[in-house]
Image (spheres, rainbow, N blue to C red):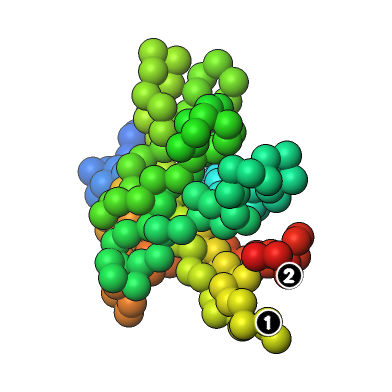
Amino acid sequence: MKKRCSNGVEQLGRKNGAGFTLIEIIIAIFILSFAIVGIFTAFSIVLILTSDAVDRLTATYLTQEGIEIVRNIRDTNWLNMDLHPDLGYTWDRELTGCDISGNPLGGCRADYKTGTGDTGEFPIYLWAGTDVDYLYINNENGFYDYNKTNLSTATKFKRRIIITPLADTDVEGKSDHILKVIVETSWDRKATILNDLVMAGSADPADSSKCNPSNCVTAEETLYNWYNYNSQ
């Protein structure tokens, strides 16, 4: 339809009530679909990265807690050496047997459960095995432990404690006053940007004695027997 403007120039225009052509509709739908897919993909990536950051933060907390548990065992041993000198307490009691030199999948587990030490007085315990179980979270107090109850929920986290005695012979010929402690906390990583699958406790492809760094947090500390050193 032609229409004449006030300046006398004829212009082409749509008829009143004319709709879009099929090609225009297809192009519009394509552009809209492309935009929606892009937004959804970006949103999914943000959710994945956020979830991974939360898991890594939780694993970092659990790893530091593992270091504190081992340190607590050592300090409790020091206390009992004073309180019960006749019972033969040593500073590294319950801290042996966690070396992985003969078993790369070995190590120990520990939590803050009360009265589970070998004599019942320690507020922690260690367990040595060929694999490490998943932690539970107690819905009543919020603590992580290995005790499955009606008040607990299974988590995606595993924590392994590796303790290696280091020889440090002094002038009196006494040795093994140093413990190298490594705590590894890993988690199930079932969805990533690359859509891969990495389970908790998976070995590092470059070193089977270590956990996969893509879903694992590691902390290391050296503990010394400063207390009552010359009597051990």
Look at the numbered disc 1 and give the secondary structure of its residue. Answer: loop
Q: Amino acid at mark 2?
A: Asn
- Asked if residue 148 can be seen in this view, the reply is yes
Dots 2 and 1: beta carbons under 8 Å?
A: yes
Residue farthest along the front direction in this orientation? 86
Horizontal side of residue 21 vs 37, given as left or right: left
The residue wearing badge 2 is 230
Residue 184 visible in the displayed image: no
Q: Residue at x 76, y 60 (%)?
A: 227
Q: Residue at x 23, y 43 (%)?
A: 22
Farthest left residue in view? 22
Q: Which mark is residue 30?
A: none
Judging by the rendered image, the residue that carries numbered circle 1 is 172
Q: Which corner quadrant of the image does residue 67 belong to?
A: bottom right
| Residue 231 image offset from top left, x and y in percent | 70, 65
Residue type at mark 1? Glu
Q: Decide: is 55 above or below 225.
A: above
- Viewer-closest of 61 and 220: 220
Extreme top residue here?
150
Indicate whether 177 appears above or below 120: below
Between the C-alphas of marks 2 and 1, the distance is: 8 Å
Compare residues 225 and 44 and report the one nearer the observer: 225
The part of the image, by quadrant, that contains residue 80 is top right
